[in-house]
Amino acid sequence: VFLRFWSLKNPFVKTDLQNLQEAQERFGEQGFTIVAVNVEDNREEVLKFIKPLALSFPVLLDPAGIVADLYQITGFPTGFLLDQSGIVESSTIGELTADVLEPFLFSLR
């Protein structure tokens, strides 16, 4: 699982989510799953923003930033690669492309 924290305040969020969608399409059949967590944005604004992106992975809302605080998020976007037990194996901050994400994802194998 790749857990991705993001915010509408980040100017590159659309490109980042599109890149994650590409990664989900490329690697989903190999067991890869993305979970995107929006932090501190309004639900209606998030829904309006993500609808045209047609994302195939779940987008969760963390309006109070409680989950983000648990992961000690200091900037957006931030991602965590979780193993099958939910243990954080590695993390990354900043925009990722599917090509950059590939070796990161398969480092667990």
Image: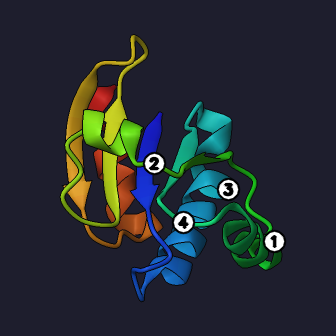
Q: Quadrant of residue 90?
A: top left
Q: Which residue is drawn at 22% across and 29% down?
A: 89
Q: Which residue is drawn at 18% across and 58% down?
A: 74
Q: In x, y percent, where is residue 39? A: 46, 57
Instruction: Mark 2 or mark 4: name the one nearer the start of the chain.
Output: 4
Is residue 39 or residue 108 the one in the foreground?
Answer: 39
Residue under numbered circle 3: 25
Which class describes the residues within 10 Å of circle 1: few (<14), some (14-19), or many (20+)? few
Residue under numbered circle 2: 64
Depth-wise, is mark 2 or mark 1 nearer the camera? 2
What is the secondary structure assignment of the residue under circle 3? Answer: helix
Instruction: Mark 1 or mark 3: name the one nearer the start of the chain.
Output: 3
Q: Residue at x 35, y 65 (%)?
A: 77
Residue 18 against residue 67 in the figure, above or below: below
Q: In x, y percent, where is residue 46? A: 67, 68
Residue under numbered circle 1: 51
Q: In x, y percent, where is residue 42? A: 62, 66
Q: Distance between the residues labelled 1 and 4?
A: 15 Å
**Numbered label attached to residue 41:** 4
In the image, what residue type sits under mark 2? Answer: Ala
In the image, what residue type sits under mark 3? Answer: Glu
In the shown orientation, is residue 16 left or right of residue 47?
A: left
Instruction: Mark 2 or mark 3: name the one nearer the start of the chain.
Output: 3
Depth-wise, is mark 1 or mark 4 nearer the camera? 4
Q: Distance between the residues labelled 2 and 3?
A: 30 Å
In the shown orientation, is residue 67 left or right of residue 44?
A: left
